[in-house]
Image (tube, rainbow, N blue to C red):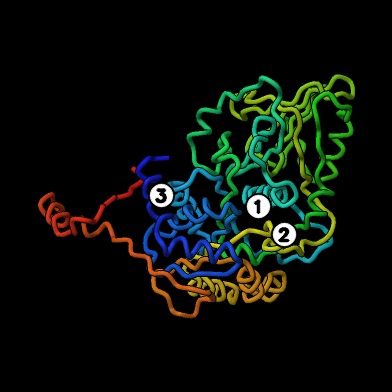
Amino acid sequence: MNEQILALKSLLRETPDFQRATEILRSGESVVWDGCVGSAFAFLGATAAESLRKTTLVVVARPGDVDRVAADLAFFTDAPILKYPVLPASVFDDAGEEIFLSEDVDFGVRLRVLKALDRRATAPFAAGTTDDVDVKVDATSEVFAKRANGATSANNANDANSANEVNAPNNATSADAPPFVVASLAALLQPVPSREQVAEGTIRVALNEEFGRDRLIRWLAEGGFHSTTAVELPGEYSARGHVVDVFAVDWDKPVRFEFFGDEVESIRSFDVASQRSVEELESVEISRLLVGGVATGSFVDRLPNDAWTLFLNSDETIGETTRLVADYSDAERSRLAKVADVVNALYRRPTAHAVAVSTGAEFATARFGVDFGSVERFQGDATQVEAAFNRSPEEESISIVCAS
């Protein structure tokens, strides 16, 4: 991370108001950060998350805001950032007896986030474990796998330089950091498969273990995977002799299994376009596309017990989501949680309301003014910018933060 950003975060942590705010959040109560404009919320949220060391749920008003907010956060933190998208309302219009886990990329992202949260809830990441376990968490996939001894990825260097939503960096500072989950309130209303449903629809295939090629093919077909001559999209598989290629819905790359009899002889992820191997793996988890039952679980209930919420402009977010749901059909609304129920569930957790202008209606223990100046004061030609600097108090330290 940029040294100037680190220095700014250090200065913020030393301020009494910030220290008091994090103390309140750590105690399980809530605060308002009043005056958050631009990316101020990301700076505050990223710095607070480092102090709290807890999973952070960032709630935004519109599904279209998720990418922008995730990008803002990525500028201020090296922690993993998971984007949780909303599905079309029509997906929840059928109260059938089966959950169809569509090969739609957005569903794969949601499943990947749920798995990541479940892993944190049941086995929190501990410092010192990253040498043994490489946890992949990226924008379209999640492959929980133990890397084979001595194996390397041809794309490691490129992956590490893409957004934080890609593989968590393998060091004690960032790989061990609890993630940010960025979601619209509308996405949080939609039901999710329960932990039991996901577990029942997931198998683990490990290197040098007997699993059986035919058994794998049968399991994939019964679970809704589509048989093709060559996999290209999530939800597909292909079988050629002793080789089975699988592209699970929550992966970003397909995986090739090679069998010797019933024994799994090789497991490798590969690139769809070039068909070249990317990484050797010791094991993978595959989730079916079809799971019995109806999705009735709550996303909020899947959060780790100590997770906290960064709620952006909560009044606006609640209002927009309420209006959005009002436009749904009765059948669509019947499958969703009520806005008030989800908001109340969030408020039972520590919450920081990051608002441009506080209405006073936010549920919080204390309010803190945020005094970040706008970069607009330094706009204009060189003479105007110089004059703006000269008008600043001598004791004022000015840092202009931009992504480029």
Quadrant for the C terminus, please.
top left
Mark 3 vs mark 1: give the one in front.
3
Q: Is residue 342 above or below residue 244?
A: below
Q: Residue furthest left?
A: 383
Disc 3 target residue? 10
Disc 2 target residue? 192
What whole-number distance in Å separates the C-alpha atoms at marks 1 and 2?
Answer: 9 Å
Task: Report crowding for label 3: few under 14, some 14 to 19, many 20 or more residues within 10 A (C-alpha).
Answer: few
Q: Which mark is residue 110?
A: 1
Q: Is residue 267 left or right of residue 69?
A: right
Mark closest to the chain's N terminus, 1 or 2: 1
User: Residue, x 65% and y 34% (percent of image)?
Assistant: 130
Q: Specify the quadrant of the image occupied by residue 325.
A: bottom right
Q: Secondary structure at mark 1?
A: helix
What whole-number distance in Å separates the C-alpha atoms at marks 3 and 2?
Answer: 39 Å
Mark closest to the chain's N terminus, 3 or 2: 3
Q: Is residue 257 visible?
A: yes
The amino acid sitting under disc 3 is Ser
Q: Specify the quadrant of the image occupied by residue 34.
A: bottom left
